[in-house]
Amino acid sequence: MKRAYQDGDGLFLLVSPGGTKSWMLRVQVDGKRRDIGLGAADVDGLGHEAFGADDTRYSNVPLMLRRDLSLAEAREKAAALRKLAKAGSDPKVERDRQRVKVPTFAEAVIEAHEALKSGWSDRTAKAFKASLEEHANPRLGALRVNAIGSAEVITALASIWTAKPVMARKVRSRIGQVLAFAKARGWRADALPDARELRTGLPKQARGGNFAAMPFAEVPEFFAGELGKGASASRQALLFAILTAARSGEVRQATWEQIDFEAQTWTRPASIMKMRDGHVVTLSDATIALLDSYASKGERKGLIFAGLRGGALSDMSLTKVLRTAGRSETVHGFRSAFRDWAAEKMPTIPAMVAEMALAHKVGTATEQAYLRSDMRDMRRALMEAWGRFAAPSLSGVAENVTSIRTASTN
């Protein structure tokens, strides 16, 4: 039978026949006596000896979660629970409220993905989970989220930091998202790993380049060459992407219902946009001609550029057209080509117009609040000029243009 030693105010030290010591609080709840266990007794402070004087891992553990309590800690915990009992709360429930099971990193990835995915595109949600499972879980997966610090993150990233720098930076950011989610759920008390410590502990990455882009002067010749080939969905999608300066994903998810041939616009819903804001693209005569030649009016339903099985084209389908043509650039690089062309060849058009054509946010938050116009007329003029430059044969201007080289030989 355990022997009980009273400290006062309902706090008891219980000693078992085998010498095990624990704390117990006796309170009245709704007129009934309740005995509540507080934790093991650490009357000599020996349970804390593994922690150095400057180690915050123990002090950051909430009082209600501490398993070994000194006399001072037991009195503090008892006082808190007594106040809750006097306020009408069940002190045992309140004691256990913080006793949550701290998940492993792998479990937290699943929890974070499930909770956050509704605010992401399907592609982002899949990439978030897949990248962490492949590159973070092998090192971090079995660790509890409250035990992960800068050293553990550095170890997880080391193998890909210089070999796969772009992916490594994404994984670092996503690890931070998981740990921030864990902190918000009460699974960890420590601050997130410090970015400066991570940079110091990892080798310097090679300077990353932008998306490989075709020089804008080469775009018309490339466009004409592809236009003369078979009109496959992936090839036409690439040409459409060039003329609209759109992202690959936006093009692959474009539907005929989003196109207004009379107004010459492509109204893109927020669901397919990177920034999650709807956007209206002004379509040049060249773009309308491309669409007209691709499908008759009776065929214009659903996805514009559907794959062989009827679904959306894969992410690599447009890139394959480039590779087949012997080009090493990226599809995204045509947006850069368009932006360079606008800067050099359309100096009278304000830079913000080209940025808005690319669906980029322009200006500060204050400037955005006061900018009510979407500059549609100026964007239309810019996109029409781009269409005439990139695809003169579709713009109806090719027959009126004589090559200087040809004229010099006559």
Image (cartoon, rainbow, N blue to C red):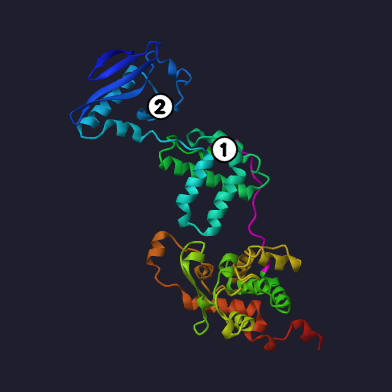
**Residue at (54% x, 68% y) in the render:** 358
Q: Is residue 39 left or right of residue 50?
A: left
Above-or-below relation of 122 to 181: below
Question: Gap between marks 2 and 1, in whole Å?
Answer: 24 Å
State left or right for residue 376 relative to residue 15: right
Q: Is residue 132 magenta?
A: no
Q: Position of residue 37 (x, y in %)?
A: 33, 24
The magenta region covers 197-215
Give the farthest residue toward the right.
409
Name the disc covering residue 17, or none.
none
Relative to 68, say whether 263 is above or below. below
Q: Residue at x 65, y 86 (%)?
A: 397
- Amino acid type at image mark 1: Leu
Residue drawn at (30%, 34%), measured in percent from left and top? 94
Residue 248, x across and y down, in percent = 60, 66
The amino acid type of the residue labelled 2 equals: Ser
Q: Is residue 176 visible?
A: no
Q: Position of residue 369 (x, y in %)?
A: 38, 64
Question: Would you identify the image quadrant in which residue 2 lies?
Answer: top left
Camera-nearest label, 2 or 1 = 1
- Name the one closer to the observer, 125 or 348: 125
Residue 59: mark in rendering? 2
